[in-house]
Image (spheres, grey):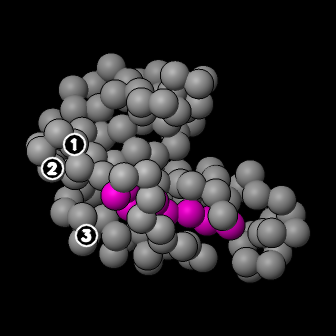
Amino acid sequence: MTLDEYNGFCASLPHTTHVVQWGGAHVWKVGGKVFAIGGWNEGAGLSVTFKVSDMAFDILKEQPGLRPAPYLASRGMKWIQRISGETMDAGGLRDYIRESHRLIAAKLTRAVRKDLGLPA
């Protein structure tokens, strides 16, 4: 997945906003909360960080090309960083980004979800 493909996909999800911050990372948010972070991985291409369920975290953190997300996972948060496509292709990555969006949106306050037109 290229940076343009990543940004295009994230933009296609409901009620998202985009900002470039943290040294050039492409950060996508829903309701002001981060659901995906895309950046360059030591010259090896695009790395993407996303929130996952507890079970997915336990499985994915051991897979080649994936790792607990630096900074986030060390603070007990269940975020994975895809650093290569060894075990997760672009389609799988899109599925996990979509699920991250859903997980973050579900944690927004009822009022924010209502304002954005998201399901309760």
Between the residue at mark 3 and the residue at mark 1, the CA separation in whole angstroms equals: 16 Å
Q: Residue at x 24, y 64 (%)?
A: 3
Q: Position of residue 49 (x, y in %)?
A: 40, 45
Q: Residues within 10 Å of mark 1 (few under 14, many from 20)?
A: few
How far from the left and from the top, in percent, is residue 85? 18, 43
Question: Tag 3, which secondary structure?
Answer: helix
Q: What residue sits 83% from the left and 59% below the top?
A: 109
In the displayed structure, would residue 111 be above or below residue 93?
Answer: below
The single residue placed furthest to the front in the displayed view is 23
Magenta stretch prevailing secondary structure: strand
Q: What crowding class fits label 2: few (fewer than 14 Cα within 10 Å), some (14-19), or many (20 or more)? A: some
Q: Indicate whether 94 appears above or below 81.
A: below
From the image, tell me which residue sits under label 2. 45
Numbered disc 2: secondary structure: loop
- Amino acid residing under circle 3: Glu
Check disc 3: other Cα within 10 Å, few if <14, some if 14-19, many if 20+: few
**Image location of residue 72, percent across then percent down:** 52, 33
Would you say residue 97 is visible in this rendering?
no
Left or right of residue 51, residue 92 in this image: left
Return the residue nearer the eye: 51 or 28. Answer: 28
103 magenta-colored: no
Q: Nearer the viewer, residue 86 or 108?
A: 108
Q: Are marks 1 and 2 in contact (CB under 8 Å)?
A: yes
Q: What residue lies at 49% left-to-right and 63% top-to-bottom?
A: 28
Residue positioned most to the right: 111
Residue identified by numbered label 1 = 41
- The magenta region covers 24-31
Query: Mark 2 is on which residue type?
Result: Gly
Marks 1/2: CA–CA distance: 6 Å
- Residue 116 location, x and y as percent? 73, 78
